[in-house]
Every structure is written in structure tokens, then in C-alpha cells.
Image (spheres, grey):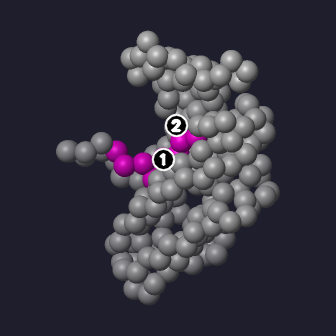
Amino acid sequence: MSRFGNRESGFFASLSGGSAISGNPCGSFYDTTIQTATLPNTAYAMKLNSTDANATNLCSVASGSKISVTQSGIYNVQFSSQFQRSSGGSTETIDIWLRQSGSTDVPNTNTHVSVQANNTYIVTAWNFFIYLQANDFVEIMWATTSTTIQLYYDAPSSPHPATPSVIATINRVS
């Protein structure tokens, strides 16, 4: 059995058997709905309606989109989202960024994604490192120039499982 970490931080984990890091805050969340933008150029929080309880420790989702932590530290927030454009022919834009504790858009986290054709699927996925204090929360925000763009959920059908509209994970790295 291997162990790593330091005694001062209490960060110890067993590497045998592929178990989760004991005591380390982490979370795995996803959404099983189609999420729409009812107005163009308006900020929306990506919803997360499900939690993988086996991969979540000391983190949670509140109010459907707020990923909350119980311990201060630097966190790695990762996500993937599947967008679909249902109609239209001109190029439209999606913006994705982080918002911290409800009102602060985190500087330098926005990314533009272009969608060109009708019935196009685009997967966006990246990660952010962010310092969060105990009881802070972070949200993954999005806006689009067109209401024909949506976060797309696909139910399971042979041969594949369900496709969540959003998957988000968080883990404390220090």
C-alpha cells in the first residue's frame, strides 16, 4: 500500500484498490435535461441536476448550478458540455466562463465558441484552477447570440448510455 501527502495538511490517501482520496474535497455532477437560452446575449448558469455520490466528498450542488465547497483551497473545476444548434444558417457564438459566489465573473475565464450550421453538435470541455474559500461556490456560465443553440441531453439508446448536457467535476489540488 502506498501513501502520499504531508502531515501538516492532513492530505493522505491510500492508492490501493483505486479508492477515492479520503478527506479530499471532490465532486462529480451532471445534468439530464435540455437547457435553453430564452434570450440571446443573456448569462445563464449551466444546470447540474445529478450527483455521482460515489465520486463526491465534501462538495455539493446548491440551487441547481452552484458547486459548493466546504474547505478553502485551490480547486480544479473541469467540465464538458454538449451544445446543439436546432436551426439557422448564420454563424452564432457561445461564451462560457466562471462566476464565483453568485455575482463575480472570474476575470480571464471566458472563451468564445462559434457554431455555423443547422443541426450541429459541439462539445466544449476545459478546466480552470480557482481559489475558493470554505462555503464559496462556483458556477459555469454561458450565453449565446441565438436562442436556437441549446445544451443538449440525449437519452440512452442502443448501443450507448445517456449523454448528459453538462458534466462537471471539482477537486481540491492544494
Of the numbered discs in the image, which one, if any, rests on residue 29? none
Instruction: Identify residue type, mark 1.
Output: Ile
How far across and down, in percent of the image, does residue 1 sit? 44, 12
Q: Looking at the picture, how far across and down is residue 81, in whole percent?
A: 47, 56
Q: Quadrant of residue 172?
A: top right
> Of residues 111 and 87, which is closer to you in this image?
111
Residue at the (50%, 72%) spot, across then down: 113
Q: Position of residue 44 (x, y in %)?
A: 64, 61
Q: Disc 2 marks which amino acid?
A: Ser
Binning the other alpha carbons within 10 Å of mark 2 as few (below 14), some (14 to 19) or many (20 upward) gives many
The residue range painted magenta reads 162-170
- Point out the image quarter for the C terminus: top right
Are discs 1 and 2 less than 8 Å apart at CB? yes
Q: CA distance from mark 1 to mark 2?
A: 8 Å
* Residue with the mark numbered 2: 28
Q: Which residue is mark 1?
A: 167
Q: Residue at x 51, y 51 (%)?
A: 79
